[in-house]
Image (cartoon, grey):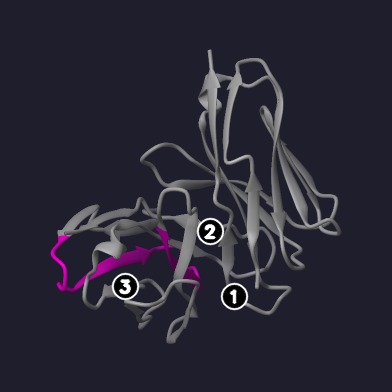
Amino acid sequence: ELKVEQNPLFLSMQEGKNYTIYCNYSTTSDRLYWYRQDPGKSLESLFVLLSNGAVKQEGRLMASLDTKARLSTLHITAAVHDLSATYFCAVDGATSGTYKYIFGTGTRLKVLA
Amino acid sequence: NAGVTQTPKFQVLKTGQSMTLQCAQDMNHEYMSWYRQDPGMGLRLIHYSVGAGITDQGEVPNGYNVSRSTTEDFPLRLLSAAPSQTSVYFCASSWGFGTGDSPLHFGNGTRLTVT
């Protein structure tokens, strides 16, 4: 069964600091997705990581994928208040033979001024 | 492009009532899905469809039905509403599944309360 775990679940950090969110998944997957959700809003796609060793960056966010370790990280550099949101990772079951996108429980990030 | 459109945005039901949540997309996406979002539990997959005429169950399908008669529409039916179905429901679609750079595109959600 495909499962996705994120940690931490909650993260409160000062502006200007760096931090990393971790996403572990249980079975083989070649693709991993990161989404952002603002309070009361929908989810928007941040990154799609397509292969082992993939790294993508957008502004202060950088995501990477290690398929051998079944681990993805979302690194936040010099956090600013606008990054406050909930971040979800997800994997698809294509490699496992299922047509499901499975999400982690999310990491709620609060950046304090 | 409207993207993924969900209606209604808010709904209050009494226990035992039935209703249909509507979802339509105008991006010619083959893959469509329904999720529910509850505090502390992330998004859980209810049902999904890989194309018109094809549907399958996700992680939490009990109490819900779906159909996919066209590529564009993927309605979710609550058969007999229960308080445990109080949640925020998201419809999402993608061009393909497991192919290339094809993330899910989400609708704005339907906030459902069952009393």
* Label 2 to label 3: alpha-carbon separation: 17 Å
Mark positioned earlier in the residue sequence (2 or 3): 3
What span is colored magenta in the figure? B13-36
Check whether the beta carbons of the residues at disc 1 and disc 3 lie within 8 A of each other. Answer: no
Q: Quadrant of residue A12?
A: top right
Q: Which mark is residue A8?
A: none
Q: Which residue is mark 2?
A: B104
Q: Which residue is mark 3?
A: B75
Which residue is pictured at 35% across the width and 72% down the height? B73
Which residue is pictured at 36% across the width and 53% down the height? B2
**Observer-nearest of A22 and B27:** A22
Marked residue chain, label 1: A
The number of callouts visible is: 3
**Observer-nearest of A64 and B94:** A64
SS at mark 2? loop
SS at mark 3? loop
Marked residue chain, label 2: B
Residue B18 on the magenta span: yes
Describe residue B13's horizontal placement relative to residue A6 as left or right.
Answer: left
The residue carrying pointer 3 sits among few (fewer than 14), some (14 to 19) or many (20 or more) residues within 10 Å by Cα, namely: many
The residue carrying pointer 2 sits among few (fewer than 14), some (14 to 19) or many (20 or more) residues within 10 Å by Cα, namely: many
Q: Amino acid at mark 1?
A: Tyr
Marked residue chain, label 3: B
Image location of residue B1, percent across then percent down: 40, 53
Q: Which residue is mark 1?
A: A99
